[in-house]
């Protein structure tokens, strides 16, 4: 796959750019960790949506999926209908979105390289998040494996002063959550934060109760030319699994869970530890890096309509090391930025079910470099390269199977500020995804071992206009993939789709009609198609062609405010329906609203989800009944429900 033969339009575009007189007033700087360091004002040539701490506080969403729904081109797949097992999808991947949208917390990967389980979004506590960066489009050169459709990075709040906060929340379906946080800066050098939470919910469907609890600790230590941090997190997440419903069951009682799924559950206990360092080496160079350990131990039972499930276990131990050098040199045309580093990941994975064991030793090593070069007033070029190697030793086969691969990808982009209010960008970025152990093998149906790794190239162009009281952005893209990894439910095998293509656009904007009234909105169009092979011309399942979101936030007084949110998603092809022959998931429109009251140290929030009480299915797939007949099956979403929170904090 040659990138540079496709990039002549960038050179032509650059040659036609005039040299403008840039005003001294510049856009407010944004800290963009898409450069893998918090550098201010880096002209990354892609569309980046920032959700600030203030917005997170205003929306008081119960989980990340609710907060990000249809922002920055993000679609949500929620098979449980209550925020559990939610998958974030960028650029239209549907069933495989969990392996093609990279989720990071402070640069730590939540995605699983060993197996195709979706990232654990339940481990994210939005109260501890300072901001969220949605990087639209491929980030394969800088972040590597699985950064295909886009990247979402959550930046934690660092403890900076003494605070005590307690949250008490309650809602429909006997739901409650308790949360406590204590933080302090003991000196100019040492700070800490301790958190604890506990929550239960019976949820709106039978056999769908959840019980979650956890602890977290973070310490920060600053010294003359750098800083250290250590964090630890423990999570215990239990949830019952209600399963899907066939149309006649859905019509009879959308809250039921059929007998076949009685007793299905999942319980995961996780330990996460992380040690990080930042060190200034000289006037222009600094060193950053993190060492991370993650241990997930899961017990579960999942059943089929044709036969009951039995208890099984899944264990995952992950070590990762991510050192990088950051360079910054002032030039007459701007600041030259250099990022060079390595990503190492070591995974031990084991799955034990009634069908047999599945075990993997995996190592992934990658080195990369990115250069941001200012070539004129308001003009910069970004280029990068990454080389990655993977080693898989599958221990569930006799003898052990070794599956190794390596590849190199590159990127090239241009960012142009004709004035202080406008930015234009153009970019091409190669990406890849290594197949996981459950894609290389299939213990249930005895699939032959081995599948091709996925590669592709993303092309993006866009413009942004930004002022103090308003901003707007438009991004147009095309994503071409070879050997996209998917699962064929008709043949019960993992497969490579020969060629696929995604193209579309995202449009976002906001404005302040007054100091007290803010409006925002977004619209996305996605056209995901299979362009070669037996399913040529068919749509990718579980992707809405059109999504839209409108929001209004109105401060009625210094203490009272109201928020309204309207969201829309067009119909979708059922999961697994690559022939596009089954009924589609219907479109849906939702209205959410919230009322807030704040009077220090107290805060009160009432949020009503699905105010119009729409009955819709949040997800669905092709399933099989007791007679092994293919049927359309659905996961109904929650009806109208409310969530009440009361918080008190002292400083």
Image (cartoon, rainbow, N blue to C red):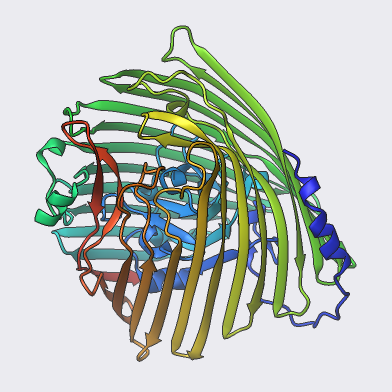
Observer able to see residue 590: yes
Residue at x 57% of width, y 26% of height: 363
| Image spot of residue 7 (x, y percent) | 78, 52
Side of 156 where 583 appears, left or right = left
Q: Nearer the viewer, residue 463 or 115?
A: 463
Give the mark count: 0
| Image spot of residue 111 (x, y percent) | 47, 42
Determine which quarter of the picture holds residue 64. bottom left
Determine which quarter of the picture holds residue 180. bottom left
Determine which quarter of the picture holds residue 445. top left
Examine the rendered structure and indicate whether residue 590 appears above or below residue 446.
below
| Image spot of residue 626 (x, y percent) | 16, 32
Q: Nearer the viewer, residue 490 or 371?
A: 490
Residue at x 34% of width, y 84% of height: 561
Observer able to see residue 370: no
Location of the C terminus (image quadrant): bottom left
Residue at x 43% of width, y 49% of height: 94
| Image spot of residue 311 (x, y percent) | 21, 27
Examine the rendered structure and indicate whether residue 79 appears above or below residue 630.
below
Side of 21 where 411 appears, left or right = left
Q: Nearer the viewer, residue 363 or 573?
A: 573
Side of 69 where 454 appears, left or right = right
Location of the N terminus (image quadrant): top right
Residue at x 38% of width, y 20% of height: 358
């Amino acid at each position: 796959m040659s990138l540079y033969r496709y990039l002549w339009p960038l050179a032509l575009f650059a040659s036609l750019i005039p040299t403008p007189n840039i005003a001294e007033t510049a856009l407010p700087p944004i800290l963009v960790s898409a450069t893998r360091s918090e550098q201010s004002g880096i002209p990354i040539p892609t569309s980046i949506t920032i959700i600030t701490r203030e917005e997170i506080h205003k929306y008081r969403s119960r989980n990340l999926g609710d907060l990000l729904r249809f922002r920055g081109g993000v679609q949500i797949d929620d098979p449980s209908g209550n925020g559990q097992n939610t998958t974030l999808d960028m650029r239209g991947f549907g069933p495989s979105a969990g392996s093609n949208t990279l989720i990071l917390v402070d640069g730590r990967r939540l995605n699983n390289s060993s197996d195709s389980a979706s990232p654990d979004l339940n481990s994210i506590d939005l109260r501890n998040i300072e901001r969220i960066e949605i990087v639209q489009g491929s980030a394969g050169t800088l972040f590597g494996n699985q950064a295909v459709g886009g990247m979402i990075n959550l930046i934690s709040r660092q403890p900076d002063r003494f605070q005590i906060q307690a949250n008490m929340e309650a809602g429909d379906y006997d739901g409650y959550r308790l949360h406590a946080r204590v933080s302090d800066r003991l000196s100019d050098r040492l700070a800490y934060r301790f958190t604890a939470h506990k929550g239960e919910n019976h949820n709106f469907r039978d056999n769908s109760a959840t019980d979650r609890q956890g602890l977290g600790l973070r310490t920060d230590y600053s010294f003359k030319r750098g800083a250290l941090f250590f964090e630890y997190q423990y999570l215990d997440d239990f949830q019952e699994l209600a399963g899907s419903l066939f149309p006649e069951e859905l019509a009879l009682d959308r809250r039921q869970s059929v007998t076949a799924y009685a007793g299905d559950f999942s319980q995961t206990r996780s330990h996460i530890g992380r040690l990080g360092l930042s060190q200034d080496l000289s006037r222009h160079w600094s060193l950053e890096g993190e060492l991370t350990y993650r241990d997930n131990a899961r017990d579960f039972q999942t059943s089929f309509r044709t036969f009951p499930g039995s208890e099984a276990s899944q264990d995952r131990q992950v070590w990762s090391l991510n050192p990088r050098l950051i360079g910054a040199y002032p030039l007459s045309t701007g600041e030259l930025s250099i990022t060079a580093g390595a990503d190492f990941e070591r995974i031990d994975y084991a799955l034990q079910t009634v069908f047999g064991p599945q075990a993997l030793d995996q190592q992934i090593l990658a080195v990369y470099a990115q250069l941001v070069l200012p070539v004129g007033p308001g003009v910069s070029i970004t280029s990068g390269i990454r080389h990655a190697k993977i080693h898989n030793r599958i221990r569930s086969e006799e003898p052990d199977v070794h599956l190794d691969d390596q590849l190199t990808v590159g990127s090239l982009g241009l960012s142009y500020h004709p004035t202080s209010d406008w930015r234009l960008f153009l970019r091409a970025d190669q990406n890849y995804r290594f197949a996981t152990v459950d894609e290389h093998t299939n213990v249930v149906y005895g699939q032959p071992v081995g599948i091709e790794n996925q590669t592709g190239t993303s092309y993006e162009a866009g413009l942004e206009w930004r002022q103090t009281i308003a901003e707007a952005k438009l991004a147009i893209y095309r994503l071409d993939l070879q050997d996209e990894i998917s699962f064929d439910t008709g043949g019960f095998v993992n497969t490579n789709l020969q060629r696929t293509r995604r193209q579309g656009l995202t449009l976002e904007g906001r404005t302040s009609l007054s100091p007290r009234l803010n409006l925002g909105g977004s619209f996305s169009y996605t056209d995901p198609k299979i362009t070669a092979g037996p399913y040529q011309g068919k749509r990718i399942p579980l992707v809405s062609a059109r999504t839209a979101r409108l929001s209004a936030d109105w401060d009625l007084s210094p203490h009272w405010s109201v928020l309204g949110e309207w969201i829309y998603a067009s119909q979708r092809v059922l999961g697994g329906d690559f022939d596009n022959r089954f009924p589609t998931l219907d479109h849906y429109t939702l209205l959410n609203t919230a009322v807030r009251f704040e009077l220090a140290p107290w805060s009160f929030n009432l949020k009503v989800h699905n105010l119009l009480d729409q009955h819709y299915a949040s997800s669905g797939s092709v399933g099989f009944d007791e007679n092994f007949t293919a049927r359309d099956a659905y996961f109904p979403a929650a009806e109208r429900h409310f969530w009440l929170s009361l918080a008190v904090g002292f400083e």
